[in-house]
Image: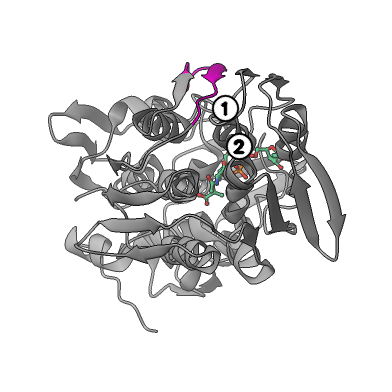
Amino acid sequence: MRIHGAKNSVLKLMAACTLAEGTFVLHNVPDITDVDVMIRLLASMGMRVTRPGPDQLEIVNPGGLTPEAPYDLVEAMRASIVVMGPLLAVYGEARVAMPGGDDFGPRPIDMHLRGLELLGARFESAHGYIRAHAELLQGARVLLEFPSVGATENVMMAAVLAKGDTVIENAAREPEIADLAAFLNRMGANILGAGTSTVAISGVERLVPVEHSVVPDRIEAATYVAAVGIAGGEVTLVGARPDHMDMLCQKVGEMGMRTSADPDGLWVMANRRLHSVDLATLPYPGLATDYKPFLISLLALADGVGIVTENIFSGRFRYIDELVRMGADIRTEGHHAVVRGCERLSGAPVRAHDIRAGAALVIAGLRADGETEVRDPHHIDRGYEDFVGNLAAIGADVERLT
Ligand code: EPU
């Protein structure tokens, strides 16, 4: 099965196209609705985006953009806020709708704002919008309270055109951050250390448009790893980067799966019922919070009891109620969940509340008696290209009803 480009990288690369005038080409772009939302956002600012071929985007930045992210688009996709840093860097101003909370609980952007403030930006908020100004962005030391992915990206994209040097400490280390830095460096930026906790950026005068291939999606790949763990069998995830999924491979290995790096990607196999383990989510290279819903589906069917601790998003347990409707034995207490594995689940109508939860319910349905109907599949479409087709291609009995 082929793994597509990473949602959480391509959205930021698209935002970074606001930084230079001219024509960019992105390859390995997944056909997902979050990319469509980002296309609408870029278009609303005055850019032209087309899909010249499968998996490709051509993005034309004619300059003179309207530096604004309207509420309907930020509400549809909170990742839209990553345009703030680059717009400030180019236009000295940005007007971005304030994102609300979501199914994970409150999701503040205080670290984004504090980081940009240290570079010289000023903010006012009124009528649900944040208005940012900066006469001159000046490099600074930005110590993040938590290695926030979005804050690291926003500050990095502002700093590339700031005057002087910026150092981001306690930066997020996700592979998607390294991909964004590689893209920016190819554009002419001067960034060192992306992918580690300390990122050093020397501001440059101008950037140029480039061509780039998006890093493979480790979260999409993890979803299919879990599908194999639940259904049994063996699959090669072509294009997956095992080196970006070390902790996941270690955990599913402890549960009894076999994984190995393959010249094509990642090979995974499960030939017996898995056993339970405890797990805790942490920033990269720890176990990603995004993997957790799939791992809970695995634990719900494993032999034994596993304790899951969520350390990134306090409210990211909501889909457990849906899994319980399918017969899973799970109790939550604060940010912990105790999962007692059972032999089989029981197919039921359930609702997807977010991208990963939706995917986790579908794969749980692979070992549930009878039919599982996952409602609101549009959440899954936000992050997965042809999820149903991919699962069907490796033998799942799954179809799209709407
Ligand atoms: N946080 C703050 N203040 C901030 C920023 C973050 O308190 O200013 C907190 C958050 O509330 C959260 C923690 O810090 O508790 C980490 O948030 P982070 O900023 O790292 O997350 P994000 O950038 O909003 C990205 C991904 C998420 C993924 C997290 C993992 C994108 C578009 N989203 O979100 O992916 O779960 O990193 O840290 O890159 C998904 O793909 O479905 C998804 C939700």
Residue drawn at point x = 75 percent, y = 59 percent: 100
Quadrant where ligand 1 appears: top right
Q: Quadrant of residue 370?
A: bottom left
Q: Is residue 227 in view?
A: no
Can residue 40 be found in the magenta stretch?
A: no
Q: Which residue is mark 1?
A: 172
Q: Position of residue 86 (x, y in %)?
A: 57, 43
| Element class at badge 1 | loop
Q: Position of residue 343 (x, y in %)?
A: 42, 52
Q: Position of residue 274 (x, y in %)?
A: 37, 38
Q: Quadrant of the C terminus?
A: bottom left
Q: Out of 299 and 81, give the one closest to the viewer.
A: 81
Residue drawn at point x = 71 percent, y = 50 percent: 315
The label on residue 308 is 2
Q: Is mark 1 within 8 Å of ligand 1?
A: yes
Badge 2 amino acid: Val
Q: Position of residue 332 (x, y in %)?
A: 71, 47
Q: Out of 239 and 79, give the one closest to the viewer.
A: 79
